[in-house]
Image (tube, rainbow, N blue to C red):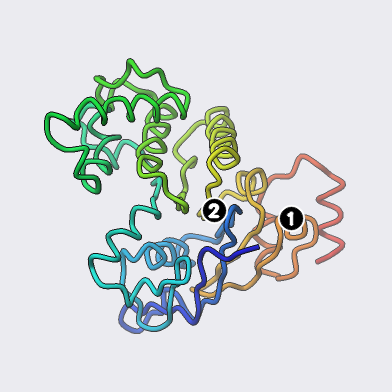
Amino acid sequence: MTNLVEIRGLRKDYGSLAAVDGVDLDVTAGETLAVVGESGSGKTTLTRLLLRLAEPTAGTVRFDGADLFALPAARLRKVRREMQVVLQDPYSSMNPRMRVTDIVAEPLVTHDRSARGRRGRAKVRARVGELLEAVGLPPDVQDRYPHEFSGGQRQRVSIARALALRPRLVVLDEPTSALDVSVQAQVLDLLTELQARLGLTYVFVSHNLAVVQQIADRVAVMRAGQIVELADAATLFSAPGHEYTRNLLDAVPNPDPRLARRRRAVS
């Protein structure tokens, strides 16, 4: 399997605090890598560095072989088309005065000159309709505003926007934490279906291990800015190797008494 992302010796200091402290991590093309940990463990800072939304104190992030922190502005702009993000609260990530068609089209207008002007409008509207249909929303909702949608529908709009430029990597930062449990399941099913159909690679950031267990291929556990355990999901949830991971799992209500007893036996 080919690594789409390679992180080596990554560090980010804020004063005397190391928010990310010497992280080495690979993301394989086509997989879902979950990054989990308590609040303040460094998950979000790690993904901001991965997307080059923050500059590191030390270390490198390579995307498809290119060192993100060494790229000139023009080359970085091209790479950004292939790296998109879905945030925790879809409502706060949308301009409430913009219609859905303009929200989803924003990446297209920003990165594709042919999408601008009078000639580009029909092209953009058709593409937005395709994207909305892909995430389970009817194309005729294009002229609605964010407040006219439910939380789950708004998150679908966010996913459509993230897919507008046909990215290879999507960072999902707590994408279901603001949703009801039943809606969470629907969004997770949608993400799984889109990944299979479009060949996407996901970095899924969450503190909800029950959600991670449903979607992740591998799991990286962060504590105090470091990766303390990295394993495939089946192994990590059945036989965690690090005490911190076991503590995280023990805090999750488990309806399967056999698995709970197995975890206690391992610990």
Instruction: First in sequence, mark 1 or 2: give its number.
Output: 2
Quadrant housing residue 71: bottom left
Q: Which mark is residue 206?
A: none
Q: Residues within 10 Å of mark 2 (few under 14, many from 20)?
A: some
Find residue 36 and report its horizontal and vertical position in percent.
56, 59
Horizontal placement of 34 versus 266: left or right?
left
Q: What amino acid is labelled 1 in the image?
A: Phe
Horizontal placement of 195 versus 260: left or right?
left
Q: Residues within 10 Å of mark 1 (few under 14, many from 20)?
A: many
Find residue 207 and report its horizontal and vertical position in percent.
54, 53
Q: Which mark is residue 207?
A: 2
Q: What amino acid is labelled 2 in the image?
A: His
Q: Please state, as top left, top right, bottom left or bottom right, where the N terminus lies in the image.
A: bottom right
Placement of 122 over or under 78, stated as above or below: above
Find residue 113 and report its horizontal and vertical position in percent.
19, 44
Residue lying farthest top? 140
Determine the residue positioned at 61% across, 49% down.
212
Q: Please state, as top left, top right, bottom left or bottom right, where the C terminus lies in the image.
A: bottom right
Horizontal placement of 164 versus 109: left or right?
right
**What kind of element bears circle 2?**
loop
Determine the residue positioned at 53% across, 41% down.
198
Determine the residue positioned at 23% across, 25% down.
122
Placement of 68 over or under 132, stated as above or below: below
Placement of 191 over or under 244, stated as above or below: above
Foreground of the two, 76 or 155: 76
Name the residue that disc number 1 marks.
237
